[in-house]
Amino acid sequence: MGNPLRTAQDRRLPRIPEPCALVIFGVTGDLSRKKLIPAVYDLANRGLLPPGFVVLGFARRDWGDGDFESLAYEAAKKGARTPWREDVWQRLASQFQFVPGSFDDDAAFDHLASTLDELRERNGIAGNAAFYFSIPPAAFPLVLNQLNRTGMADNAKSGGWRRVVVEKPFGNDLKTAMALNHLVDEVFTPADVFRIDHYLGKETVQNILALRFANSLFEPVWNSKYVDSVQITMAEDVGIGTRAAFYDSAGAARDVLQNHLLQLLALVGMEEPTSFDPNEIRAEKLKVLKAISIPQDIAAGSVRGQYLQGWVAGERAVGYLEEKGVPENSTTETYVAVRLGIQNRRWAGVPFFVRVGKRMPRRVTEIAILFKRAPHLPFDPADVEMLGNNQLVIRVQPDEGVVLKFGSKVPGTTMEVRDIAMDFQYGEAFTESSPEAYERLVLDVLVGDRTLFPDAAEVEQSWRVIDPLEEAWAGTEPEPYRAGEWGPRASDEMLAREGRSWRRA
């Protein structure tokens, strides 16, 4: 029963879920150890988890609850964002349980179902459970069918709510995405499906909406009359690590362009929603995704690259083909740049340049709105040689914040105008540090808030953008670039043909 003295509009008290269980499939994997378990600890440390909350781990290990607790302890202590408090951990760890088994093991899933039934009475969770798929996409159908067979996905049978969290990638193309969406929406009700894109959990990404719609300063110039172009960059200084098996079958476009970057593009390009309601926000994002146009000549309007050996941050880096587990003749791209458009009145004629790459000089994700130059400059040409386009840059990571670049007179006796920057950083402006993305998203799942989760229509529409690019690239060789460079030379040439250049991130 809710608090009768509290209204839905009262945001002074934190959102705390109903008593529930979080079931993590693949709990011994990297995602669980590095992100999920630390996020659960941080939520507990901030007092945001309900009494009776329980974590059920499921994996192919012959472990007991004690072994699971030891793994979770190491993971939480290493990855926690908030200060370590042993008393908080002890309370949380007392509610950890482990169920061993493989995904095709009927008996293990029957045991999982009976365990959840026992917890309903013992922990008072009233049948509420969220199932987190921290597993390879190929295993999704197997686990979904097991949850369907045992009735664990059935809200009515459980006596509470049952939700599922599906990690990206959501399929490998439009056809497989539609099949997966159909299956997951058939096993769970569509409202109980949470397709997680951790980029949408970042404070800076959410701040795009606040920046645009809570201020009267930006929206009047957020259109083709004033905007010259938009650049969205996601650069990573790391290689593929231990992800060779997945990455070589996916590539940069399927791995992050289809989800992270198209979601950022949708948030930048969307119209103002009628309210901050999840359905209203998704409806506006979907309109943008449907309006995206790809280059008529994909070969000229896009670039695929693959890194060679080089130097990154003063350290020697091997080339992609020398990475462990990568076939020596692989043509998988580690870099993609593409010129997209949005076919509507607001953005007609404005190019959106999107690029993603590995083994770049440094790690940075940012959205740069480049404005048109002033229509008339009453200065001597020599006085404005150092003056560029006005820019609004939203830094998503690692130094979260917003930069506004504009022209200003240089102190002195001459009229020299040069670009300067006003820099807002989250870490300096607010006393409270930003929660980690998974921390926010796990809490949203448990309280049932779908605002930051793409629905099936968004996922499928994103694949309708990517699939034609993949078809055009099939059988082509990626352009080489050295590790530590900002991608292939052809990427710079693509913008230079229009008299533009990549912003120095």
Image: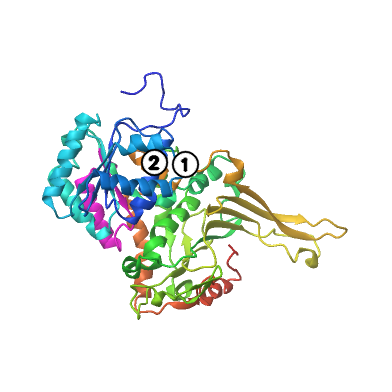
Residue lying at 30% horizontally and 51% vertically, measured from the top left: 166
Q: Which mark is residue 441?
A: none
Q: Which residue is mark 2?
A: 41
Q: Is residue 53 left or right of residue 309?
A: left
Q: Read off the magenta span.
A: 162-191
Q: Residue furthest top?
A: 5
Q: Residues within 10 Å of mark 1 (few under 14, many from 20)?
A: some
Q: Is residue 251 above or below residue 226?
A: below
Mark 2–mark 1 distance (CA, rounded to whole Å)? 9 Å
Q: Quadrant of residue 1?
A: top left
Residue at 53% of width from left, 54% of height from top? 398
67 relative to 43, above or below: below
Horizontal and vertical percent position of residue 345: 50, 54
Quarter occupied by the C terminus: bottom right
**Res. 82 mark:** 1
How busy is the neighbourhood of tag 2: few (under 14 within 10 Å), some, or many (20 plus)?
many
Q: Where is residue 486 shown, x and y percent of the image?
A: 54, 70
Which amino acid type is shown beneath numbered disc 2?
Answer: Tyr
Q: Kindly give the residue lying farthest to the left in the view shown.
A: 107
Identify residue type, mark 1: Thr
Q: Is residue 94 visible?
A: yes
Position of residue 452 relative to residue 178, above or below, is above
432 to the left or right of 21 = right
Secondary structure under the numbered disc 2 in the rendered image: helix
Residue beneath the point at 38% across and 62% down: 255
Task: Tell me if 150 is positioned left or right of 264 in this view.
Answer: left
